[in-house]
Image: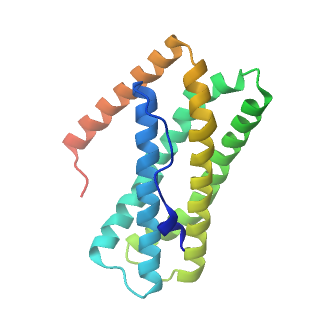
């Protein structure tokens, strides 16, 4: 079974704090975009990239180029300081590993993203088997990372983040959403 077929909703807890709702929604979207990437490379391996799949691929590439990167910066800025201050060595060690994962995810994206962008732009010089393996590796890295965040990092951050830090993070995210909405209204995506 391919990683695309295995992609499922991870077990995040129901939290009403705007920060954690936003982070959880981003994880859900990441899983959807990973499915789109895998669907596109599976179609390419069969020798075709139908228009609907091409559009999904274009959207997924843009999402990983922008939102996914910002998501990792948000986690490192708003969650990781609380987690690194933990008296539990396992929490600190896992947080350091998650930070390292962000670097590996970025490195993998820097390798696979331009190839996917080339496909979006109509360049089919990409070797589909190599790209397929790269996307599968990227997918597995992201999914393993999500499991660690949702099973340990997010619950620990929820339990230990002080109210002022939470409020400041929520305010920053709300401001960013307003800015993005204003930009989208001025210049809608094609």
> Going 41% across and 80% down the picture, which residue do you hit?
43
Residue at figure coordinates x 44%, y 63% from the top left? 35
- Residue 127 seen in the figure: no
Say which quadrant the N terminus sits in: bottom right
Quadrant the C terminus occupies: bottom left
Is residue 81 shown left or right of residue 14?
A: right
Question: Would residue 17 be found to the left or right of residue 54 on screen?
Answer: right
Residue 109 lies left or right of residue 60; in this view the side is: right
Name of the residue lying farthest toward the right: 89
Colour scheme: rainbow
Image position, residue 16 (x, y; %): 39, 26
Q: Is residue 141 above or below residue 135?
A: above
Q: Nearer the viewer, residue 162 or 76?
A: 162
The residue at 47%/57% (across/down) is 8
Q: Locate residue 63, reporting x and y percent.
A: 41, 52
Q: Position of residue 74 (x, y in %)?
A: 52, 33
| 72 or 30: nearer the viewer | 30
Residue 57's image quarter?
bottom left
Q: Quadrant of residue 59?
A: bottom left
Q: Evaluate whether residue 37 shows in this view.
A: yes
Q: Position of residue 38 (x, y in %)?
A: 47, 69
């Amino acid at each position: 079974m391919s990683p695309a077929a295995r992609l499922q909703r991870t077990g995040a807890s129901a939290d009403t704090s705007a920060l954690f709702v936003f982070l959880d929604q981003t994880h859900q979207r990441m899983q959807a975009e990973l499915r789109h990437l895998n669907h596109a490379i599976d179609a390419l391996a069969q020798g075709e990239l139908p228009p609907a799949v091409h559009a999904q691929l274009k959207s997924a590439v843009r999402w990983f180029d922008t939102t996914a990167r910002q998501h990792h910066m948000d986690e490192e800025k708003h969650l990781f300081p609380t987690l690194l201050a933990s008296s539990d060595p396992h929490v600190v060690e896992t947080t350091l590993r998650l930070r390292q994962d962000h670097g590996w995810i970025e490195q993998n994206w820097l390798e696979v993203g331009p190839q996917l962008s080339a496909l979006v732009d109509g360049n089919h010089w990409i070797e589909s088997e190599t790209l397929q393996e790269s996307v599968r590796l990227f997918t597995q890295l992201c999914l393993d990372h999500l499991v660690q965040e949702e099973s340990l990092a997010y619950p620990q951050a929820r339990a230990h983040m002080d109210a002022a830090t939470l409020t400041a993070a929520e305010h920053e995210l709300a401001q960013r959403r307003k800015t993005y909405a204003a930009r989208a209204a001025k210049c809608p995506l094609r």
